[in-house]
Amino acid sequence: MLSDEDHMLACQQGNKESLEVLYQRWKRPIFGFALRLLGRRADAEDVAAEVFVKLAEGRNIFRPEAKFSTWIFTVARNLAIDKIRKNKKMTSSDTENSEPMNLQDQTLNPQEQLAAKDLGEVIGRAVRALPPPQDEILVLREYQHMSYGEISEVTGYSIEKVKVTIFRARETLRTKLHFLLEGRP
């Protein structure tokens, strides 16, 4: 099985099958990343589609020594930031109608699934309410499972700034969501 970087190199040679493989591998992670940052399904779908248009159009921009995941998340991040800037006039009522994060465990009974969905909504709103860059850095770390170095490459921040930002984001969430932790060991 070829790596993402190998598929990208094949795309640079005009191989459309490799482009399709990359799309199939990365459409869900990119959509999930955009949804967690933007909070609205329609906006996330727009950003995800734009990422793959950029991938197809800008395939010659990719440097073979770069890690593909870092490159594609950088593109997604930049497009999401652009979308956030365009939607800056969004009202607080729009924020309340945003898409919840899906934290449901299919092994739970319906009542437990509803509780998990509600918890996911609360956590999702709290993450989206974090100030930039805490929101995006925390999403890259906790939901995309990127290393500090990868986050540094995607955002352009130093590794030390990434670590401090993640710490601050977690502390902010701990403060905002303290009521969820009450009564737990």
Image: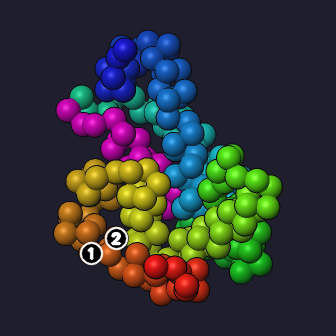
- The residue beneath circle 1 is 164
Give the magenta-colored segment's residue range.
65-81
Res 62 quadrant in image: top left
* Tag 1: amino acid: Val
Per the image, label 2 sits on a secondary structure element best described as helix
Q: Between residues 113 and 35, which one lies in front from this camera angle?
A: 113
Residue 63 position, x and y percent, is: 25, 33
Colour convention of the picture = rainbow
Q: Are marks 2 and 1 in contact (CB under 8 Å)?
A: yes
- The residue beneath circle 2 is 166
Residue 44 position, x and y percent, is: 62, 52
Indicate whether residue 3 is drawn in magenta.
no
* Tag 2: amino acid: Ile
Residue 86 position, x and y percent, is: 60, 65
Within-10-Å neighbours for mark 2: few <14, some 14–19, many 20+: many
Q: Is residue 165 above or below residue 57?
A: below
Quadrant where the N terminus is found in the figure: top left
Within-10-Å neighbours for mark 1: few <14, some 14–19, many 20+: few
Per the image, label 1 sits on a secondary structure element best described as helix
Q: Magenta region's main secondary structure?
A: helix
Visible in this render: residue 181?
Answer: yes
